[in-house]
Amino acid sequence: MSLYKRLHDIQAAPTTAAERTDTTLNDLRRSIHEELIVELGPILYDKSLKPDDAKRKVNDAVQAALSRRKTPLSVADRNQLIQDLANDILGYGPLEQFLEGDEITDILVNGPNSIYVERNGKLEKTDVKFVDETHLRRIVDKIVGEIGRRIDESTPICDARLPDGSRVNAIIHPLAIGGPFVTIRKFSKERIGIDELIRFETLNATTARFLQACTVGRLNIVVSGGSGTGKTTTLNVMSSFIPSDERIITVEDAKELQLLQEHVLTMEARPANVDGKGEVTIRDLVKNTLRMRPDRIVVGECRSGEALDMLQAMNTGHDGSLTTVHANSPVDTMARLEVLVLMAGFDLPIKAIRDQLAAALDLVVHMTRLRDGSRRITQITEVTGMEGDIISLQDIFSFDYGMGFDEATGRHRGRLKATGTRPRFCEKLNDLGIRLPTNMFDAEDFAGQPALTAGEDPYRGDQPVAMTGGYPEGYEPPPEGYESPAS
Ligand SMILES: Nc1ncnc2c1ncn2[C@@H]1O[C@H](COP(=O)(O)OP(=O)(O)OP(=O)(O)O)[C@@H](O)[C@H]1O
Ligand SMILES: [Mg+2]
């Protein structure tokens, strides 16, 4: 059992004599930690210090502090205490163990006693705990302090990043009841490129080639999908197709994109300071890109009024722009963009917004996280223009859900298939010298999914549906032993 867990359990119920003795470990740990922060202060922020040297210095300081206290400890407890204090001081305490490797993508801290992780696409509760709220707060302060931000009662919400690029959101008392709450989206240590996306079956070689042609051919593309479906990763991969002789400007809330081209300018928005001043929004930055002679504008995510500036850029010669939008389908993406444009604060008629959207956008790449935990592109949809008051969309490739699950692995057998529609922008690509194989868009057979009759559909019959949570009728979990392709 880890020292953290033991300390925690003991704190909760110090009943037996052995446990009472062990509470001294807790006090010891706390007092040594406080002492070492003061003693080692400048060393901890010395970026030129090699990690091994920092580790040695911390180990020596912990040993010295333990010797000064003369508290008798078993060798195992002593070693564990040194290790845990080193994790607290040099790393992120109990979270450290989840940061290694790629199988965990999200770490969700719901207060000191509850940590969930998403492993191979599935959410699971861990038995890891912080000693107490103060312990968790210290780690939160460390994370945000490292990038020069602050979190306290007057600014209880903070976005930050770990040195490896992982995204962190922290929210503390008095907003987070039972908190602090910390949400960490880890970055894959393995660089995800197009080969990895094909290996994970997020898309196939044909659709990869298609998306490459669309990016090189300067189409305006939106990657859409729900939370954590892999939008940013796909945007990053698609951006890597941009020819290296183009000037690329990226705008993000917190830097996540990692473009390898030489001519890339990266800009990051800034929240307001403690006095509520100095905020620079994504929108300010998107506007500024227009004065910076971009060949391409890549906006990490359109979340607000910047959608209007993005559309205007796309409609005024800055084609080939890329972004992501949180939406549940390509149709929903259009509706969402309408709302985001309205958030810019102008009272534009809906028809005018739709006209702009239809004129600006060429393609929507929609992502879904399937029941088996895998992240797939499920629709590649062309924006073809307006029909009356409605933006018309047509699927070029669509995921065949009817192929069902592999019984042995639990993995969805479906893949993207051509719907038989040849995109209208093929002519534009042709003009640019980008030729796609003529058979790329030949209609493929879709496995027919047996339709539910009215009586079978739990949501359509006369029977009331029990809304007590849990899975709907007919839900089939993936079989035991299912492994996500991302692992
Ligand atoms: N195609 C993929 N297959 C497997 N894992 C992936 C894939 N794409 C992304 N991931 C992993 O899934 C996690 C979420 O990815 P990403 O940040 O790209 O999603 P997102 O949709 O942008 O999330 P958010 O909605 O929070 O912005 C990351 O840890 C990433 O490494
Ligand atoms: Mg994202």
Image (tube, grey):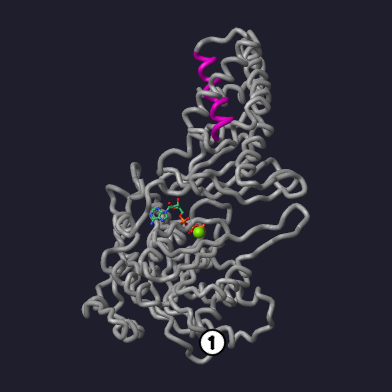
Comparing 482 with 468, the one in front is 482
Comparing 304 with 296, the one in front is 296
Residue at (51%, 72%) from the top-left corner?
333
Residue 71 in the image, given as x and y percentages of width and height: 63, 9
Q: Is residue 81 magenta?
A: yes
* Number of callouts: 1
- Image-based side of 132 in relation to 205, left or right: right
Residue 311 in the image, given as x and y percentages of width and height: 54, 78
Residue 181 in the image, given as x and y percentages of width and height: 63, 44
- Residue 259, quarter of the rendered image: bottom left
**Residue 422 appears in view:** no
**Could you say whether the residue bearing mark 1 is in a helix, strand or loop?**
helix
Residue type, mark 1 in image: Asp
Asked if ligand 2 lies within 8 A of label 1, the reply is no
Q: Main secondary structure of the magenta part?
A: helix
Q: Is residue 32 magenta?
A: no
Task: Report the magenta residues as a range.
Answer: 76-91
The residue carrying pointer 1 sits among few (fewer than 14), some (14 to 19) or many (20 or more) residues within 10 Å by Cα, namely some
Give the vertical position of 441 relative to 239 (above or below).
below
The residue identified by callout 1 is 355
- Residue 129, quarter of the rendered image: top right
Residue 357 in the image, given as x and y percentages of width and height: 52, 81
- Image-based side of 405 in relation to 160, left or right: left
Residue at (33%, 50%) from the top-left corner?
485
Comparing 50 with 183, the one in front is 50
Give the vertical position of 34 relative to 319 (above or below).
above
Residue at (68%, 34%) from the top-left corner?
133
- Residue 85, quarter of the rendered image: top right
Q: Quadrant of the C terminus?
A: top left
**Residue 74 appears in view:** yes
Toward the front, the furthest residue is 48
Give the vertical position of 130 relative to 471 (above or below).
above
